[in-house]
Amino acid sequence: MADAIDQANELAAAEAEHGVAVARAAEHPVGIAGECDGCGDHFARLVLDHLGYRCGYCRDGRRKPR
């Protein structure tokens, strides 16, 4: 018989599987190559948002590694 820890692990695994399935099924915006309207650097994938075509770093508010 499964104890509480085994049941918790099974629930966590099922929730993680569900999260991955939902993320894979979600539509991701199509990107284009070019210069980012935020930082001006060239990227292979820019996505159009309310501020123009921006890289993932500018969209997420992260600093680019140097």
Image (spheres, rainbow, N blue to C red):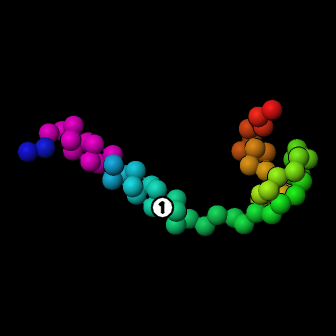
Residue 8 is a magenta residue = yes
**Which quadrant holds the C terminus?**
top right
Percent x, y for residue 39? 88, 44
User: SS class of the residue under badge 1?
Assistant: helix
Amino acid found under the numbered disc labelled 1: Val
Q: Is residue 35 visible?
A: yes
Q: Which residues are magenta?
A: 3-12
Residue 28 versus residue 34: which sits nearer the camera?
A: 34
Taking the spot 78% from the left edge, 37% from the top edge, the residue there is 64
10 Å crowding of disc 1: few (<14), some (14-19), many (20+)? few
Q: Is residue 20 above or below residue 8?
A: below
Residue 23 in magenta?
no
Q: Which residue is mark 1?
A: 22
Left or right position of 24 against 17: right
Q: Count every numbered label the image shows and give the total.
A: 1
Q: Quadrant of the N terminus?
A: top left
- Judge left or right: residue 4 versus residue 49: left
Look at the magenta stretch and give its main secondary structure: helix
Residue 30 drawn at (x, y percent): 72, 66
Q: Is residue 49 visible?
A: no
